[in-house]
Image (cartoon, rainbow, N blue to C red):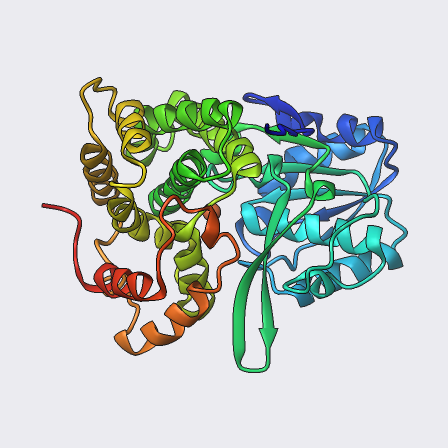
Amino acid sequence: MFVFNSPTKLVFGEGTAAGAGSELKALGVHRVLLVTGPGRTASQEALAGILVSIREAGLEFVHYAGAGADPATTMVDEGAALYKKEGCDGILGFGGGSPIDCAKGIGASIGENRPIRDFIGTGLAFTKPVPPLVAIPTTAGTGTEVTNAAVFTLVDGPRKAKTGTAGTSLFPRVALVDPTYHRSMPPELTAATGMDALTHAVEAYVSRNHNPISDFFCLEAIKLIGLNLKRAWKNGDDMEARSGMALASTLAGVGLSQAGLGMVHGFAHAAGALGGLAHGMANAIMLPFVLHEYISDANTRLAAIGKALTGRQAATALDAVSAIAELGSDIGIPPNLKSAGIPESLLPELFDDAKTYKRRPQSPRLFTDEELERLLYKAWSDSMID
Ligand SMILES: [Fe+2]
C-alpha cells in the first residue's frame, strides 16, 4: 500500500517564469508578497522579468527581501507581519531553497494564524488552508518548489538548530521551473545545489518509505544528474545541461516529498546549523560515507543508483559509492568535513544534533548511536576517493 500525492502544477522550460503574473491572477491573487533573499535574487536585474509579468497581469506587489540562508523563524514572522500589514492575498517565492521555504513558512503561518515556530519540533500539524503560493527556483537543488517540506533555523538563545517541517499545505500551488534563471549560478553553487539534488534522489530511492512511483522519479533524476551536473558546472551557459539539472532537481523533489530522506540530511542539517556549512556541500561530503555503510542493507538499490548515474549496466553498489565520491571531487567538493572547515571540537555537538534527526528511521540501515558517531568521525577525517 502506498500514497502518491504530488499536487503542485509544474510549468517547466525556458521562459516559463514570465507566466508568474498570470498564474497568480488565475489563483485569484490581487496583491502578492514577493519573497526573495537579500542578495543576488533581490536585485532589479534579477527581478525585472518577474516584475513585468506581475504588472502585466494587473497585480500589485510588496517585496520582502529578508529571507536569508536557512531562514530563521523570525524571518518568517517578519514576512508574515508584512503580508498582513499590506493586505496581501498570495505569495511568490523567488530564489534558492531558502526564500521558497521562507515563503512556504509565511503561507503556513498566515493560514494557521500562529507563528511558524509553534510547528517546529512540537508535533503540531498544519491543518488549515494557506494562501496561494507560486514558486520560482533559481537554483537546481532543493526541489522545494514541488515538495511538502520546508527547513527553518530555530534560534534558541546561543543554540541553533535546523529543523524540517512538512505538511500537505506546504506544497506550492504552482512551480515555474525556468532554467534561464539558473544560468548565472557560479560553479560552486552549481556543484553544491546539484549534489543536494543527487542526495535527495538517492536518499529517497533507498528510503524505507519509497514506493514504485517515487522510485521512477528518483532514478530519472539520478540519470539526468549523471549526464548534466559536470557539464553545467564546467559551462554555466550550457542550457541543455542547465535544463537537465533543473528537471533533475524537480524530479528529485517529487521523489523526496513522497519517500522521505535519511541520515545524510541528518548530518547535513547539523553541519549547516552548527558549523555554517552550505547545505548542498554538507550533503555532498556526507553522501558517499553514509552510502558505504548501506552496502549490505541496500545492495540492489545502490547498484541501480550506480547504473543510473554512470550508465554502466554492470555497476555495483560499491561502484555507485565511488562514482558519487568521484563526481563530488571532480566538481570541487572537499573530501571530508575537516577540509570543509569543520573543527574537530564541534563533532560532539554535531553528533548530538544529528542523532535526533526525525527522519533517521527512514534510512535503510538503522544505525546505533555508536555507529553514527563512528561514521561522523570517519567523514571528518577520511576520504572516499582512492
Ligand atoms: Fe537537501
Viewer-nearest residue: 300 or 337: 300
Q: Is residue 267 above or below residue 287?
A: below
Q: Residue furthest bottom?
A: 157
Quarter of the image where one finds residue 313: top left
Relative side of 162 to 372, left or right = right
Relative side of 45 to 237, left or right = right
Where residue 98 sits: x, y (%)? 57, 52
- Location of the C terminus by quadrant is top left
Q: Residue at x 43, y 64 (%)?
A: 355
Relative side of 156 to 350, left or right = right
Q: Residue furthest front?
A: 1
Q: Is residue 159 above or below residue 40?
A: below
Relative side of 21 to 149, left or right = right
Where residue 159 sits: x, y (%)? 53, 77
Q: Residue at x 52, y 23 (%)?
A: 213
Quarter of the image where one finds residue 291: top left
Q: Residue at x 28, y 73 (%)?
A: 343
Q: Is residue 262 above or below residue 137?
A: below
- Location of the N terminus by quadrant is top right
Q: Residue at x 64, y 29 (%)?
A: 6
Where residue 3 sits: x, y (%)? 63, 29
Instruction: Inspect this view and state whether residue 43 appears.
Output: no
Quarter of the image where one finds residue 194: top left
Where residue 166 sits: x, y (%)? 64, 48
Task: Give the mark count.
Answer: 0
Instruction: Inspect this view and state whether residue 79 appears.
Output: yes
Q: Residue furthest top?
A: 313
Q: Is residue 175 above or below residue 325?
A: above
